[in-house]
Amino acid sequence: MKEKYNTKLYNWLDERFHLDSLVSFLKHKSVPDYRNTIWYYFGGISLLLFIVQVTTGILLIMYYKGSEDLAYESIQFINAKVSFGWLIRSIHSWSANLMILSVFIHMFSVYFLKAFRKPRELTWYTGIFLLFLCMGFGFSGYLLPWDELAFFATKVGTDIAGQLPFVGEFLLKLLRGGDDVTGATLSRFFGLHVAILPGIFIVLLSFHLIFIQRQGMSEPEEWKNKPESEKKSIPFFPNFALHDLLIWLIVINILAILATFFPWELGSKANAFSSAPVGIKPEWYFLFMFQALKFIPAKIWIFEGEVVGILTFGLAGLLWILVPFWDSKTPKGKRNKILNYVGLFVLAFIIIFTILGYLLA
Amino acid sequence: MSKYINTLIVSLFLLNISFAGNKIFNKSNKQKVDQCITCHLDDEETNKEPAHLYKQDIHFEKGITCAGCHGGDATKDDMDEAMDKNKGYIGIPNKAVRYKVCIKCHSDANKMKSFGSNIPTDQFEKLKGSIHFSESLNGSTPIADCVTCHSVHNIASVNSPKSTVYPTRVPYLCKSCHSNAALMKKYNPKLPTDQYNKYRTSVHGKQNAKGDTNVAECVSCHGNHGILSVKNSKSSVYPTNVPKLCSKCHSNAKLMDKYKLPHDQYENYKESVHGKALFVKQDLSAPACNDCHGNHGAVPPGVESISNVCGTCHNLNAELFEKSPHKKVFDKLNLPECETCHGNHKIIHVTDELLGVNKHAVCSKCHNNTKKDKAYFAVLDMKTLIDSLINSDSSSKKVLNNASQKGMDVSDAMYSLKKVKQVLIETRTVTHLANLKKFKSKIKKGFALTSKTKKEGLDAIDEYYFRRYGLGVATIIITFLVILLYIKTKRMDAKKR
């Protein structure tokens, strides 16, 4: 009887939406089953956290006021007066941080598993740009509560952008909407956070997901010369999807615990005339760059130390993005040890300088 | 032995005669050679002219000739020789620098000693820093110099009643400029010019007019050579220095006994809430002696004017007291209004202990536990209500602190609770009206605030536990789903293999 109703419903939908091709696609889609399968879940975790961000962001925007006079008060209102406002705001903040962490892990896993190699170069590029957008979300969202820490961290952050040769001053004014961090900066960051960045993000994410669906999951490089019969895989649906769901539930649980036991704090209201708090530092995902710039001497030969630092980071970032271009060994089925060393160096650099950033603050 | 003693006595006697003779000789010798006086006396028609006046001057007495100030040679009877510029003759000293003539001797301790004077030699140093030595409107002379106060040619010792600066004459001297509204306006339009008139209405002024040199006159408070602006913190009449200044005389037991006055006011004032505000907090708005007693017209405030004096600052209290039933009774019994409950010089910080019927309460001085005395029970009610509001406030605070420590945002309630402090101030003020009904209507707002904030605090604590329990339930459900999914995936993976 039950089966009869299910079949009826399926047929009804199939008649209208031609579900056969989708079902056939899902039946054939599989994920390699080997020791590194665990890393394949981080893309899904990032996607879940993005969905959480969008949902909580929409709820927050109902009460948030993006102006210098009302921003701080509106967050106070959300925290104290709106039903479950504290939970939504806290989840939004925690989820943002976990999402960036998850995207970083996803990027490094793709790098070390060499999943960027042909034919997945475009998936890699869109992924990297999605990471940059996530950092942009973090940077712009951090200012929105308009509290003291956010105000001065934005000041420091935009100051660094202003150090760039040729375009620095223009970029600084573009970001701040003037010479200083003011209400105009807040309005810009708000617009960026809720309209411009999400718009670009959705487009890039769509491409990123379409590429994955079209090309399937990347197989490990050592499988290149293996016969098909020796390649173990699990069907995406329902096996991998249920594993995904399991991990998503765990992540949601972690998120709820963090939001309840460590609610995101709100400092005192930003005041441009007060002195900057001691040990002001950016969010953790910018900290390695911030700390490294601090170690660079003021002058390197005839150049400003900070400018040299920023350009070096820019160049390193560009090389990182272009890894599918300069890695010539992996596509030929050879092991590229240098690539692993570079990856380990970058990972160690980020971890060490982030820790130093907290210790020396 | 007696031979030696006799010789010693005779020697000392001769020595004394020889010194005295020498002094007399010097004096008469110097006066003899002042040819200026000889000629100028002949030229003068009245005894108010310089040479006549100078003969009564203390400097003439000390043997100083006209040349001492005007230069030249006083020993010459020839006019050209006596007024020879080569011998330093300057004629009438220039007004801008005539003080230099005075300080030539008065700033030189050795010279002063040679004239047998032991008066201080720091007058000019003090005068230099004083407000009087600032440049006058003409742009060349100081506002006042030595001559302005001590006059010229007939200068008398300060101890002489003839002196312009003798205590009984000082008020007249200062008045000559300070009561001149036209002149004072040019220098300081804000400075009043009625000090002299007020002074004459004061106890000090009246005694001074009677010839009493012990009472304060202008110089006693403002100083003499080194007078500073009242705004200058070093001035003796700067608010924080006033109590000490008055205590110079009013804490002098010997002097005050003469006038049958107490001499503990300064010690009491130091202990008072006003004294602590002025000395410890350096709060210049706190009243010093002059703020209650007046300065130039200093008198002890009368019974009927005390509430006006205190009411200058505590105006609301004074206003309420005026409307209270106490006003009539106090007037009838001739009781000083504020002073009866709060004291005068030693006004200590008012606590709620002042109100009520226990032995420390001022109300119990007059009100008794009798059926007729309704006020006794009204006071009892007031005290109970104030104590109760304080307890209620502290209880609400505890609840809010508890909620805050749990990480709940109760800042709005905390802010509202702060208003209880204001309600308590208002309620305490209303006690001056001695009206239980009005008192209750005021304190009611405080109770409303404490109960509202306490409820907000308790709600926040409830919310805290709701979040924890909510999380617990959600975690259990999710964990259950995770377990189910785990079992399902395990089975599926096993089936696939």
Image (spheres, coloured by chain):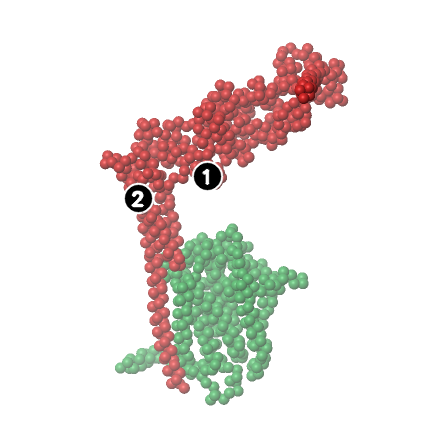
Chain colours: A green, B red
On residue B277, which mark appears? Answer: 1
In this rendering, does residue B83 appear at all?
no
Return the x and y of residue A210 as percentages of the image width and height: 46, 75
Quarter of the figure with residue B465: bottom left
Residue at position x 66%, y 20% in the image: B2
- Residue B364 placement: quadrant: top left
Observer able to see residue B90: yes
Q: In this view, does A146 lie above or below B58?
A: below
**Element class at badge 2:** helix
Q: In the image, residue B138 lies at what x, y percent?
A: 62, 27
Relative horizontal placement of residue A149, taking residue A83 as reference (left or right): right
**Could you tell me which quadrant the C terminus of chain B lies in?**
bottom left
> Quarter of the image containing the N terminus of chain B?
top right
Residue neighbourhood size for the residue with mark 2, other residues' Cα within 10 Å, grouped as few (<14), some (14–19), many (≥20): some
Numbered mark located on residue B385 in the image: 2
Q: In this view, does A103 lie to the left or right of A242?
A: right
Q: What residue type is labelled 1?
A: Ala
**Residue visible at 44% across and 58% down in the picture:** A266
Front residue of A356/A220: it is: A356
